[in-house]
Image (cartoon, coloured by chain):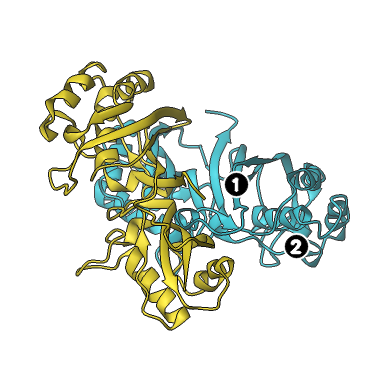
Chain colours: A cyan, B yellow
Amino acid sequence: MKRIKLIVAYDGTNYSGWQVQNNGETIEGVLNRAISELTGEEITVIGASRTDAGVHALGNVAVFDTESRIPGEKFVFALNIRLPEDIRIQDSCEVPLDFHPRKCVSTKVYEYRILNRKFELPCERYTSYFYHRPLDVERMQKAASYLVGEHDFKSFCSIHTQALTTVRTIYSIDVDKCGDFITICVKGSGFLYNMVRIIAGTLIQAGIGAFPPEHVKEMLLALDRQAASQTAPARGLRLVEIQYEKM
Amino acid sequence: MKRIKLIVAYDGTNYSGWQVQNNGETIEGVLNRAISELTGEEITVIGASRTDAGVHALGNVAVFDTESRIPGEKFVFALNIRLPEDIRIQDSCEVPLDFHPRKCVSTKVYEYRILNRKFELPCERYTSYFYHRPLDVERMQKAASYLVGEHDFKSFCSIHTQALTTVRTIYSIDVDKCGDFITICVKGSGFLYNMVRIIAGTLIQAGIGAFPPEHVKEMLLALDRQAASQTAPARGLRLVEIQYEKM
């Protein structure tokens, strides 16, 4: 038996998120079927990040175990011809049997894209959040600075979380403007349910001057979801990359 | 009576192009209905560029005449709430009655986007052309240089053209690489049917070394569609802007 690691890119628009569920098609479900069909086994992948409905990925990570003789690096080709056009494997390789995409130490990189202009651009509507009020990038960057480091992010987490602890570490948050796009790039060891989208929603409010950037410190200390701003829509979010410490 | 000019952005994926036709929904058809509904008149817009099925626009131009009392600059708001999400007016204003979007002298700016990497990225599939063989941007730029200026572009024009002359002037072609994207930006006074897509297809072939860049000179001189390369797919093309000499 061997363990295969996949780097998975997808357009999440037409999916009910990553994780298999009763209602609606999921990325995991499509992958399980495609791999099972290819190897003739009953395969269930383990995903690194269980992204929400409408969230995209350039590099989510999934593993599965197989007795197949197909070499690890060939799965990328064999799977892509069986997958729908909104899911594309970017790489495949064999990894040690004890490699677990959620349990092994990693850095996750998420990007939240905001289209900040007077009128929406139709071609960008599924992959960015259109926000028409002018955003002050410096204020957003300042507000973001208080979130960097190890904190209890209870205020920045859906009340529906099942996490045992809401303490997480953010390594960096970069807010950059390029043309009409403002991109919030967040790197951390792990994220709570809706955490990046609540951070994005909060930075947007800081960007229109709804509160002074320093106010983010109090939001953190409140340990109360009500203290932070609204969750920004899923379509602006993409999982860019997961970097593992080993391998 | 007054004449209103619209700047129109659209995602062309789900349309049979700009121009009203018997089969399939068109941008023009949707605009005609939305404006007619708004003003209570029977409106037919005149478009500057009759883009093909699947081609996108950030700034196509259309005009229509109306007796409506709605101020020119308010049409943008009144129309956007009536339009589907894949069409968005960017600006509206009153213009002189003799302004004609096709007959007035203008510079048109088109961009052709190529995603050049080993595997496709699903989120980019409708707005770029995925091409996996590595492209040499310098060769593409060199090949493009022979197309700049006034030439008979008969070789770079669909045989189905109805143009009286195939002589056109290209002011500039810039081939730029940014990450995995190669963008071909073409500026000219006017373009023939499929001209930018045939230019893109030809530069791609130059980019993989199918012929030396200088060979483009002979392609032009051949005055024969067979001499140039294949038409690149519509989805990579977007009309960026139309700049009018007056106004």
The residue type indicated by label 2 comes to Ser
The answer to whether B59 is drawn above or below residue B32 in the figure is above
Label 1, label 2: how far apart the Cα atoms are: 21 Å
Q: Is residue B142 visible?
A: yes
Chain of the residue under the numbered disc 2 shown in the image = A
Callout 1 secondary element: strand
- Secondary structure type for disc 2: loop
- Residue visible at 34% across and 65% down in the picture: B28
Residue under pointer 1: A181
What residue occupies the far bottom of the structure in this picture? B40
A227 relative position to B225: left or right: right
Can you tell which mark lies on residue A170? Answer: none
Q: Residue A62 versus residue B195: which sits nearer the camera?
A: B195
Q: Position of residue B218 (x, y in %)?
A: 17, 20
At a point 43% along the width and 74% down the height, the residue shown is B35
Q: Are marks 1 and 2 in contact (CB under 8 Å)?
A: no
Q: Residue B20 in the image: state x and y as whole percent.
A: 27, 66
Q: Which mark is residue A229?
A: 2
Report the side of A215 relative to B4 (left or right).
Answer: right
Choose the circle earlier in sequence order: 1 or 2: 1
Q: Counting other residues with Cα less than 10 Å from the Cα at mark 2, is it few (<14), some (14-19), or many (20 or more)?
A: many
Is the same chain shared between marks 1 and 2?
Answer: yes
Which residue occupies the foreground of this view, B5 or B85? B5
Q: Position of residue A210 (x, y in %)?
A: 81, 60
Tell which subunit mark 1 falls on. A
Instruction: Judge whether B78 appears above or below A199 on screen.
Output: below
Report the front residue among A176 and B243. Answer: B243
